[in-house]
Image (cartoon, grey):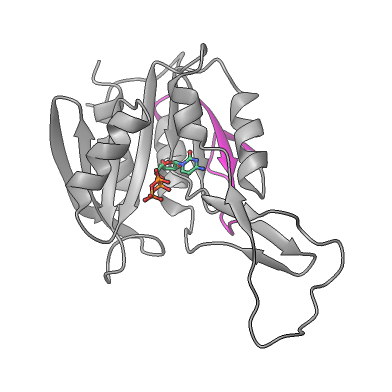
Amino acid sequence: MSVSLAGRRIVVSAGPTYEDIDPVRFIGNRSSGKMGFAVAAAAARRGAQVMLIAGPVHLPTPEGVQRIDVRSAQQMRDAVFAQLPADAYIGAAAVADYRPRTPLSGKLKKTGETLALELVRTPDILAELGTHALRPRRLVGFAAETDDIAHYARGKLVRKRLDLIAANRVGQPGSGFESDENALVVYAHDGEQALGPAPKTELADGLLDLVFPD
Ligand code: CTP
């Protein structure tokens, strides 16, 4: 029997962010948003009040979930912080780490044989929440890694002051961004637990059991 989440307020981020280069081009990534949408849906099924902050994705809003659509990392950050206080933040979004320094108002024309774009860091939503006065009591990150999963995931758990981080291997068939299935290893400060391989809807419930053990 899953624990009821009635009375809990949960903020979930999902999908990629798009960082504009000019009016027709952007820097994005391959996140489909499916994992975050599955987590939002599962939390709502258990009675939580769920706010889903979605990057640009093509997914219907799950039943019982409130949704705000955003585009850039900065917009996602502002939308998440506007939802505080909350009992939990589950950061399933693949937030861009860098954006073009100055998005152009007109279309960039081709000139030379090479082109250098200057990129600057975006706000790290999770890390900022980790030290914020209104830090949600449960702070959960995701880590998509190609190698050395445990090492990098545990590093982010500590650096961003998270309670849990759900790590998965990307770049292999049947797991990661575009797939309906995934396998996660969820790291806590005092242990770890493997979930799946399983459909993302099932993993979402397994993850919520770890986020809210009672
Ligand atoms: N994240 C965030 N804000 C950012 C970047 C990432 O909140 N600007 C969150 C993501 O939602 C995810 C977690 O941080 O839950 C891991 O993101 P990742 O980009 O892999 O972490 P980084 O610390 O940026 O590490 P890397 O060097 O692998 O990019």
4 vs 95, left or right, is left
Q: Splitting the image into 4 quarters, where does residue 83 fall?
A: top right
At 47% from the left edge and 50% from the top edge, which residue is drawn?
A: 94
Does residue 206 lie above or below 20 as drawn? above
Does residue 160 lie above or below 143 as drawn? above
The total of numbered circles placed on residues is 0
| Residue 50, x across and y down, in percent | 52, 28
| Residue 19, x across and y down, in percent | 65, 56
Towards the viewer: 199 or 146: 146
Question: Does the magenta-highlighted stretch encompass residue 46?
Answer: yes
| Residue 190, x across and y down, in percent | 14, 25
At 51% from the left edge and 37% from the top edge, which residue is drawn?
A: 124
Towards the viewer: 107 or 208: 107
At 21% from the left edge and 36% from the top edge, which residue is drawn?
A: 187
113 vs 32, left or right, is right
Q: Which region of the structure is painted magenta? A: 44-67
